[in-house]
């Protein structure tokens, strides 16, 4: 009878560690997903937001933004195409947009 208890205990222990390994593997898969852009500051996934018709990446925690190649130029081009009153405020608008969390 002692042998059957040992086998049951060993089976439960094996299942526990198997579950722990599966959880660790899933966590690693999520953290290394190449389709998810991560914040260089926090390492957490960033959100994609649209500003001046350009999709930019923003860190949810820090509020920092990251622009891909050519995105700043696109934002400037759109801002310069606006009326003179709107053009004067585009930087204020941009910084106000950035600070929204």
Image (cartoon, rainbow, N blue to C red):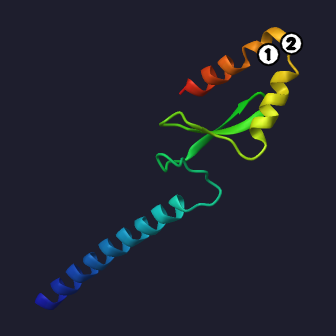
Q: Secondary structure at mark 1?
A: helix
The quarter of the picture where residue 76 lies is top right
Q: Quadrant of residue 80?
A: top right
- The residue at 84%/26% (across/down) is 78
Marks 1 and 2, how far apart at CA: 6 Å
**Image location of residue 90, percent across then percent down:** 73, 19
Work out which quarter of the rendered image holds the N terminus and state it.
bottom left
Disc number for residue 32: none
Task: Judge whether residue 82 can be spotted in this image.
Answer: yes
Q: Which residue is mark 1?
A: 87
Q: Position of residue 8 (x, y in %)?
A: 23, 81
Instruction: Tell which of 1 and 75 is nearer to you.
Output: 75
- Do the residues bearing badges 1 and 2 touch, measured as CB atoms within 8 Å? yes
> Which residue in the structure is indicated by mark 2?
83
Residue 33 horizontal side relative to residue 85, left or right = left
Residue at x-position 79% and y-position 16%: 87
Placement of 37 over or under 91, stated as above or below? below
Image quadrant of residue 52?
A: top right
Total labels drawn: 2
Q: Is 4 situated above or below 37?
A: below
**Neighbour class for label 1 at 10 Å: few (<14), some, many (≥20)?**
some
Q: Is residue 8 above or below residue 39?
A: below
């Amino acid at each position: 009878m002692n042998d059957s208890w040992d086998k049951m205990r060993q089976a439960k222990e094996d299942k526990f560690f198997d579950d722990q390994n599966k959880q660790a593997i899933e966590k690693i898969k999520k953290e290394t997903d190449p389709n998810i852009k991560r914040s260089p500051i926090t390492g957490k996934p960033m959100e994609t937001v649209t500003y001046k018709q350009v999709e930019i990446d923003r860190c949810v925690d820090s509020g920092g933004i990251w622009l891909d190649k050519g995105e700043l130029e696109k934002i400037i081009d759109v801002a310069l195409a606006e009326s003179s009153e709107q053009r004067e405020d585009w930087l204020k608008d941009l910084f106000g947009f950035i600070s929204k969390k």
